[in-house]
Image: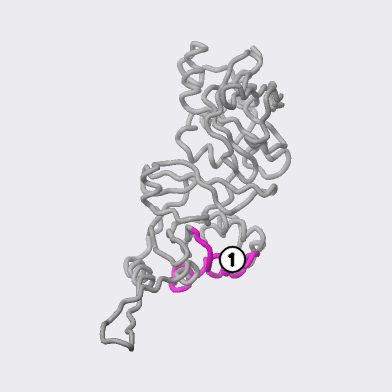
């Protein structure tokens, strides 16, 4: 069950961040001046965000100064969220988290610019970019969905939205959003449910989830991720009614043909005629009609969304399953 802040605390946050009344001594008219707190001041005034404040002070990069200016959207985890995160990752306390890692995790909760809840609900779902980075300095992506409230990366839900700050907006969330892997973006987005089912089929010899969740060699990975519709089209094409009918050797070689190891290949790195060496068979890039991948059977997959950046690699969405040479 999601952690929900108590109503008095919510009212405290909202009321304290709104206004102070002052008088002008030069005339008899009362004047109201709106004084809104900074993001850091809002967090400091709320007892249930005290661990967040401690983390901001302990992390590399002087984040308290950074988040006292500029214009940001901050997803602020509660104390319970931090406690769960520390326990799940084997830390007895905040002090045990390396300060550089802590900084990057906190920056994964910071979006440049002001994003209010109506912006998210209007979009429905999609990707935005945080201030966290991978080892190459690429900013990480963040998947949001509003199907059941507002949720980020499939794990962190908003329990209080749109707290106004002088330098942006704060949304209180019920889970710490860890640095995403390419698996995070596959499992959090319903458009990849069939891909996840394929990667986790019980008869596969390779534990793809473990491999693609790793930040050790052979990461980083570049994953060309087919949509549910792409898999549906494949089954029709090969005359099969379900994923379970695909022979295990063919499924393994097919999945391998969607993964590049030891390379974070961004869309800007793709060039006309470029040969892409995957864990399976090679692919060729075509830019004649937008970015496309051509397999050894001359089947063409359009890259319909690019550069979903994880910490251990990048995901590009494709509209057709590419195949090894048949």
Dot 1, crowdedness within 10 Å: few (<14), some or many (≥20)? some
Q: Which residue is mark 1?
A: 63
Question: How is colour applied across the structure in the image?
Answer: one colour
Looking at the rendered image, the quarter that the C terminus falls into is: top right
The overriding secondary structure of the stretch rendered in magenta is helix
Rendering coords of residue 220 (x, y %)? 68, 40
Can the viewer see residue 7? yes
Residue 238 higher or lower than 114, as above or below: above
Rendering coords of residue 126 (x, y %)? 46, 41
Residue 139 higher or lower than 79, as above or below: above
Left or right of 31 in this view: 296:
right
Residue 133 higher or lower than 296, as above or below: below
Rendering coords of residue 196 (x, y %)? 52, 32
Rendering coords of residue 300 (x, y %)? 58, 18
Q: Which residue lies at the image location 59% right of the left edge and 36% below the top edge? A: 315
Q: Between 310 and 211, which is closer to the camera in this rendering?
A: 310
Q: Is residue 71 magenta?
A: yes
Q: Residue 12's image quarter?
A: bottom left
Q: Which residue lies at the image location 60% right of the left edge and 64% below the top edge? A: 92
Q: Between 117 and 4, which is closer to the camera in this rendering?
A: 117
State the SS at label 1: helix
Can the viewer see residue 201? no
Q: How many marks?
A: 1
Magenta span of residues: 44-72
The residue lying furthest to the front in this view is 26
Q: Which residue lies at the image location 50% right of the left edge and 59% below the top edge? A: 72
Left or right of 208 in this view: 232:
left
Q: Residue 85's image quarter?
A: bottom right
Q: Residue 141's image quarter?
A: top right
């Amino acid at each position: 069950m999601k952690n929900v802040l108590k109503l008095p605390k919510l009212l405290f946050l909202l009321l304290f961040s709104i206004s102070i009344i002052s008088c002008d001594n030069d005339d008899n008219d009362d004047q109201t001046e709106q004084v809104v707190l900074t993001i850091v001041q809002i967090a400091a005034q709320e007892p249930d965000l005290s661990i967040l404040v401690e983390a901001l002070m302990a992390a590399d990069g002087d984040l308290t100064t950074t988040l006292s200016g500029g214009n940001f959207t901050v997803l602020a985890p509660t104390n319970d969220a931090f406690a769960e995160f520390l326990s799940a990752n084997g830390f007895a306390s905040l002090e045990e988290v390396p300060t550089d890692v802590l900084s990057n995790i906190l920056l994964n909760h910071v979006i440049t610019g002001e994003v209010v809840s109506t912006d998210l609900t209007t979009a429905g779902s999609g990707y935005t970019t945080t201030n966290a980075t991978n080892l190459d300095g690429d900013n990480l992506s963040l998947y949001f969905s509003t199907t059941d409230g507002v949720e980020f990366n499939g794990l962190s839900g908003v329990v209080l939205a749109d707290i106004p700050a002088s330098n942006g907006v704060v949304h209180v969330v019920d889970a710490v959003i860890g640095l995403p892997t390419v698996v995070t973006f596959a499992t959090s987005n319903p458009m990849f449910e069939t891909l996840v089912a394929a990667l986790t089929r019980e008869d596969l010899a390779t534990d793809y989830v473990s491999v693609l969740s790793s930040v050790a060699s052979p990461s980083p990975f570049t994953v060309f991720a087919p949509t549910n519709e792409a898999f549906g089209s494949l089954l029709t094409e090969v005359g099969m009614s379900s994923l379970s009918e695909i022979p295990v050797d063919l499924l393994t070689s097919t999945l391998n043909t969607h993964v590049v190891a030891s390379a974070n290949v961004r869309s800007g790195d793709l060039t006309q005629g470029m040969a892409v060496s995957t864990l399976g068979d090679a692919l060729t890039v075509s830019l004649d009609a937008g970015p496309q991948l051509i397999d050894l059977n001359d089947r063409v997959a359009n890259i319909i969304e690019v550069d979903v950046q994880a910490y251990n690699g990048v995901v590009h969405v494709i509209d057709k399953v590419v195949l090894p040479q048949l």
